[in-house]
Image: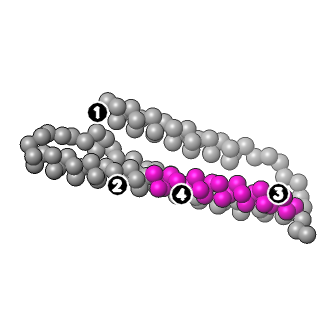
Amino acid sequence: MIPRYNDLAANERTYLAWMRTALALIAFGFLLERFDLLLRYFAKSMSEGKIPLTPPGSLLGREAGIILAALGLLIMLISTWRFVLTTRRLKSEKEETYNILSVLITGGIFIILAVFVLLYIGRFLNLS
């Protein structure tokens, strides 16, 4: 029997959940960037037909995609670091105190993501 198996398995499940979240952010960033490319293509084809069309969010779609992909990579790095650190702590015999720094970093990342999404949606609604 592996000592502290339940704790180690819970740590691994948490790590995999963070990886899934990071991959979703990267995929969503890629989708935003490609959707912006599609909007630009349609705008070009519509302007050739003499119908003026400026796609909403075309100035921000590529940058938004890159930011979301970078945020996903950052979350991957932080979650891997956290997984390794927690695994070492679970396997060691010495008692550890709770560190609030990682909670503050994670909360800060989510606050930045929420502000980014709100600004992106607000800009999209103002342009359309």
- The location of residue 17, given as percent across then percent down, is 65, 54
Label located before the other in sequence (2 or 3): 3
**Residue type highlighted by circle 3:** Asp
Which residue is pictured at 84% across the width and 52% down the height?
96
Which region shows up in magenta?
4-28
Q: Determine contact: label 2, label 3, CB under 8 Å.
A: no
Q: Residue tagged by mark 1?
A: 127
- The location of residue 76, given as percent across then percent down, is 58, 58
Q: Determine contact: label 1, label 3, CB under 8 Å.
A: no
Label located before the other in sequence (1 or 2): 2
**Residue type highlighted by circle 1:** Leu
Please, what secondary structure does the residue beneath circle 2 have? helix
Q: Determine contact: label 1, label 2, CB under 8 Å.
A: no
**Residue type highlighted by circle 4:** Leu
Asked whether, in this view, residue 85 is left or right of residue 78, the answer is right
Q: Residue tagged by mark 2?
A: 34
Q: Residue tagged by mark 3?
A: 7
Relative to 22, residue 122 above or below: above
